[in-house]
Image: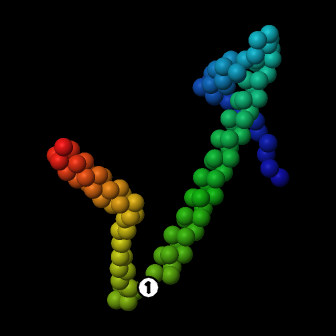
Amino acid sequence: MTKNIYQKPSPETQAEALKIARATQRPGQTKEQTKLIAQGIEKGIALYKKQQKEKARELSRKLKKASSQQQHSAEPEDQEMEIVERIVYRQHWLPWLLLALSWLGWGVYFFVSRGQ
C-alpha cells in the first residue's frame, strides 16, 4: 500500500512554471487558462523530480550492493592480482593527409610564383 501524499510545489517551482506558461501564452488566452497551464507544468516538474529521486535511490542501492559484494569477495592481500592498463593512442589519417597536401600546395605555389 503506497501513500499518495501530494506535496505543494515550492515557490521557486511555482514561479518557474508561471514563467514558462506566460512565455508560451497565446493571444487571447485568459489568465485562468494560463494559470491552469502553469499548474500542469508544476505537476510535470514535480513528477520529473520524483522520478529523478527514485533513480538516485535505485542507483544508491545498486552501488551499496556492489560495494558490499566487493568487500565480501575481496581476496587476501597476498593474492592480489596486478592490473596493468595499456593505453593506445591512435590518430586518424585524414589530418596528416590534409597537412601533407597543404605543404605540397604551398611548395608548388612558391616554385610557380618564383619562376615567373
- Answer above or below: position of 14 versus 114: above
Q: Residue at the left extreme? A: 114
The spot of residue 49 in percent (x, y) is 65, 41
The spot of residue 38 in percent (x, y) is 73, 23
Residue at 80%, 10% in the rendered image: 28
Residue at 46%, 81% in the rendered image: 74
Q: Residue at the right extreme? A: 1
Q: Kindly state the secondary structure of the residue where label 1 is placed.
A: loop
Q: Is residue 110 visible?
A: no
Q: Is residue 29 left or right of residue 80?
A: right
- Answer above or below: position of 74 versus 26: below
User: What kind of residue is marked 1?
Assistant: Glu
Q: Quadrant of residue 91?
A: bottom left
Please name whichever residue, 42 or 73, is drawn nearer the observer in this view of the structure: 42
The spot of residue 34 in percent (x, y) is 76, 17
Q: Quadrant of residue 27?
A: top right
Q: Is residue 3 left or right of residue 66?
A: right
Structure colour scheme: rainbow
Q: How many marks?
A: 1
Q: Is residue 105 visible?
A: yes
Please name whichever residue, 76 or 14, is drawn nearer the observer in this view of the structure: 14
Q: Residue at the bottom extreme? A: 79
Please name whichever residue, 8 or 48, is drawn nearer the observer in this view of the structure: 48
- Answer above or below: position of 21 versus 4: above
- Answer above or below: position of 111 versus 43: below
Q: Which residue is mark 1?
A: 75
